[in-house]
Image: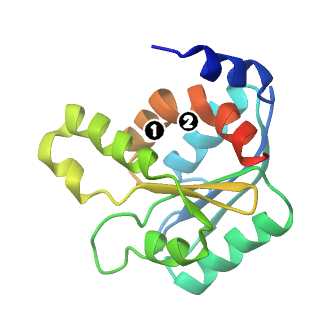
Amino acid sequence: MNSPSAQEHRDQSPQAIQFGVITVSDTRTLESDKSGQLIADSLCDAGHKLKTRIIVPDEPDQIVAQVQEHVAQETEAVILTGGTGIARRDHTCDAIEPLLEMHIPGFGELFRYLSYEDIGSAAMLSRAMAGRIGSTLVFCLPGSSAAVRLALEKLLVPELPHLVFHSRR
């Protein structure tokens, strides 16, 4: 399952990365934000360093401003949760996509595939995506705690250092 070159890159990957969490919600607070807390706890438990955790309303200009601030501070990864569906107030992906210098289509594809195994055809409602701005990785996850847990356990925790290794090259 692991190619020798992929394993070699994993071995050269940083042990700890700095990350930020942005919850996109019109209703959540830090106290009621289970998904944002789950991201912070899971990545910190994996040995990474939380730089910031904030809540922003589902307003494109505010989402963009927060991501650009993380990029300016050279945060290695920014994980957004919320606003990735197809409801009228779901603006996260539309706000982030124009900022991306490079898309990582495999992230969204794998996320929807894994999600399909759990929830069936409703997985198509997710616009989860990832990409790179400069050397900062940006991940847009759904707001559902179950979806966030899936993305963390199956994709981000195992591969985030490897992704950071490549984004620095």
Quarter containing the C terminus: top right
Q: Residue at x 62, y 67 (%)?
A: 101
- The circle on residue 156 is 2
How many angstroms separate mark 1 from mark 2 (CA)? 6 Å
- The circle on residue 151 is 1
Residue 153 in sight here:
yes
Quarter containing the N terminus: top left
Query: Where 160 sits versus 109, above or below?
Result: above
Closer to the camera in the image, 99 or 64 = 99
Residue 99: give x, y in percent of width and height: 61, 74
Q: At numbered mark 1, what does the secondary structure look like: helix, strand or loop?
A: helix
Q: Contact, CB < 8 Å: mark 1 with mark 2?
A: yes
Query: Where 88 sits versus 2, above or below?
Result: below
Residue 39: give x, y in percent of width and height: 59, 41
Residue 4: give x, y in percent of width and height: 61, 14
- The circle on residue 123 is none
Q: Residue at x 76, y 50 (%)?
A: 76
Query: Where 72 sits versus 113, above or below?
Result: below
Identify residue type, mark 1. Ala
Closer to the camera in the image, 108 or 22 = 108
Upstream in the sequence, badge 1 or badge 2?
A: 1
Q: At numbered mark 2, what does the secondary structure look like: helix, strand or loop?
A: helix
Q: Residue at x 79, y 24 (%)?
A: 12
Seen in the image, is 32 located left or right of residue 167? Answer: left
Identify residue type, mark 2. Leu
Residue 29 in sight here:
no
